[in-house]
Amino acid sequence: MSHAPPMNQRISTAGPDSAYPPPHNQSGYAPPHPPMSEAGRPMSAYNPPPMRPQSQYTGRPQSQYNPNPSSQYYQHGKNKNGAHYGHLVTQEPDRDTACGGDACGACCKYNTLACLFCCNGWLRLCGRGMSIKDILSQLNSRLYTTGKETAREYLDKAAAPFEVFDRRAKRMQRDRAAARTADSREVDYLRDEVARRVADRLLDIKRRYHTVVDIGAGCGHLAKAVDDDMLDKLIMCEMSPTALNRDIDQEYDVEVERRVMDEEMPQFEPETLDAVVSSLSMHWINDLPGMMIQVRKALVPDGVFIGAMFGGDSLFELRTSLQLADIERDGGIAARVSPLTDTRDMGSLIGRAGLTLSTIDVDNIVVNYPSMLHLISDINAMGEGNAVVHRLQFIKRDTLLAASAIYKEMHGNKDGTIPATFQVIYMIGWKPDPSQPKPLPRGSGQTSLGELFDSTSHKL
């Protein structure tokens, strides 16, 4: 005669983690012999009986919603031939207790829609004296809270803005370079030269400045190139405190204030600066338009911005040599040199930032080095190493030697040195002001170009 096992030997299949057959060292029923199918064949552990489907509300196991899940057990017996058989018996809980828990039941703890439409949850809410209006109000409140949590969770997991350069790595490079004080001062020749050319452009403007900001000041290269005839106060902003304070004891001709600030996010009061200058720092900024917009807001009306940055043709000799060496040794090209801005993009950048009367010019500074290894050593000592996000952290020895040989063969000088070209883009933009000159409206001309050409041709 068939009989059901005791309750403490039943197998609960309320969640997806339930296993068949259960191990002997866990709670649950372990049958004394393999269960048999209705056909009299043993049931394999790889072919378990069908499980109760998981709740479809929010993806949580059903046991979190229903405090009284259904239980299943095997009912055993013998057929006429004396062979054992077994079949699965499912015992459902009482319908009156299916939606238990506080207020409307544990099945509705995480999902209000489940509360209103499962079992007798609606009747339970109404039985507590809640009107339809109160029920809908509670529903809207829970849905609104859940929506806010979902939106906050989505924003937390949202991808960060697209970044080309690793700003943290760049700050560490500048810190390490400035920490080697003697080596860092030996490679100041390039930054000092560009700072002098930026100061000349600032001097070409016939006015005296009260407050000027140097964004990406480094070790104070611009402060050495200006004097008190041009401005009263220079604010040096640099994200590397080691570089900013390398020459803390040096005296300048103007009043100097040092601020540790990321040049990608300059923070100044609106309309407080007469001029903003940036010398060889903007080529490491990810959001150039955003940085330029912040500069425009900080400038007074008719204030000027003067910037200098490396252009796209900088170190083209090194770039091509490394690419050819990578192709020869590894069969591909790696990002060895950081990408740089093209000259044609700077005009649209200044216009996008809201600056007017833009002026752009380019200088090519050629420096000769004994070898490519000396060039790379100076670049690292300047803190100008590669800082691309997906950069390679190493270069193989044979690739480096092959690139050095290619560099000397393709670009070397007759005296055995190699040239390195640094293209510097200078830009000038002004904050709009009614006093600035403006072009005449279209169609206001009084002289025809055709008549002018005719009169000129008759004279010739």
Image (tube, grey):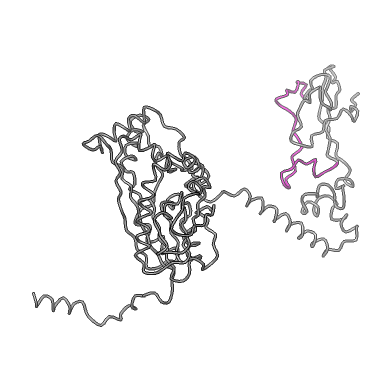
Q: Position of residue 311 (x, y in %)?
A: 36, 51
**Residue 433 location, quadrant:** bottom left
Q: x, y percentage for residue 401?
A: 34, 29
Q: Quadrant of residue 25?
A: top right
Tell me: residue 95, above or below residue 394: below
Give me the residue at 36% from left, 46% from top.
189
Q: Is residue 151 left or right of residue 246?
A: right
Residue at position x 50%, y 62% from top? 294
**Which residue is situated farthest in the bottom direction here?**
446
Foreground pick, 25 / 136 = 25
Left or right? Give the position of 383 relative to 12: left
Q: Nearer the viewer, residue 174 or 32?
A: 174
Does the magenta-highlighted stretch encompass residue 161?
no
Tell me where the magenta segment starts and ends, as one range: 38-67
Above or below, comparing residue 433 to residue 365 in the picture: below
Left or right placement of residue 177 versus residue 46 in this view: left
Q: Residue at x 23, y 38 (%)?
A: 413
